Amino acid sequence: MTAKIGVITFPGTLDDVDAARAVRIAGAEVVNLWHADEDLRGVDAVVVPGGFSYGDYLRSGAISAIAPVMRAVVDAAGKGMPVLGICNGFQVLTEARLLPGALTRNQGLHFHCTDTYLEVVNNDTAWTKNYEAGQQILVPAKHGEGRFQAAPETIEQLEGEGRVVFRYTDNYNGSLNAIAGITNETGRVVGLMPHPEHAVEILTGPSTDGLGMFLSAIGTIAA
């Protein structure tokens, strides 16, 4: 049976179409979800894509985190559904308390748009099983508020429990411990700032390295 992966659109979302294309290229069925939806329409996993949802008012991701669809996502994640937050989606997941920490203004207060190599630190999550630990993947990044911050005890917990999923090799935005992506306690909710959905075809991206995240989710669903 074909996996169904939902892709959420909020007002101001930019990368929902790209995320949906990545899901299709990986071989899953895309289910388009709207911010006002109160149920997830039978999906097996959810992608919360990047952009500037609600214009980043209050804080990036703050309003999206309380949208009706996110109440359904929080409930489904609690039952083990794989959830991926990309860039603004990562911000939404932290605001919804599905992931710890916060994404703050980049070091130097600059918006960065660059291709970056990420180290795969944890390949035992729902979204990274197709990678090798220590592998470097090349994906685009584009954000002004991607500097990962958390209390010292939270950083210690993330590191000690192996919940850092990706680490920057260049750490251009000044994230603590060069953290680019993390997971929750179950390994089924993952957030990262760079954009794997923009690295699924050579025609449109710097590599196809991002495709592994979506293939990993499909494999997790099948298992």
Image: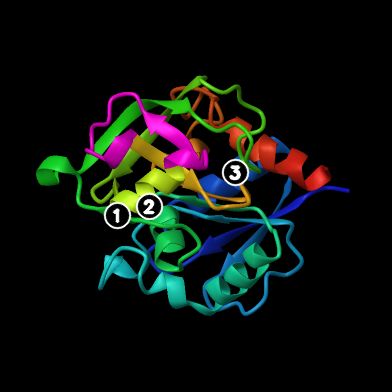
Q: Position of residue 143 (x, y in %)?
A: 29, 46
Residue numbers of the magenta segment: 159-178
> Are discs 2 and 1 less than 8 Å apart at CB?
yes
Q: Does residue 205 show up magenta in the picture?
A: no
Q: Residue at image x 54%, y 52%?
A: 184
Q: Does residue 168 show up magenta in the picture?
A: yes
In this rendering, position of residue 146 left or right of residue 205: left
Q: Nearer the viewer, residue 12 or 130?
A: 130
Tell me which amino acid carries mark 1.
Answer: Ala
CA separation in Å, label 3 and label 1: 36 Å
Secondary structure found at label 2: helix
Q: Kindly identify which residue carries mark 1.
A: 151
Secondary structure found at label 3: helix
Q: Kindly identify which residue carries mark 3.
A: 21
Query: In the image as oriented, which residue stretches furthest toward the right?
Result: 1
CA separation in Å, label 2 and label 1: 5 Å
Tell me which amino acid carries mark 2.
Answer: Thr
Q: Is residue 213 above or below residue 105?
A: above
Q: Which-is-in-front pick, marks 2 and 3? A: 2
Q: Nearer the viewer, residue 53 or 220?
A: 220
Residue 154 numbered mark, or none: 2
Q: Position of residue 154 (x, y in %)?
A: 38, 52
Mark 2, Cα crowd under 10 Å, few <14 / some 14-19 / many 20+, is: few
Q: Residue at image x 56%, y 74%?
A: 69
> Are discs 2 and 3 less than 8 Å apart at CB?
no
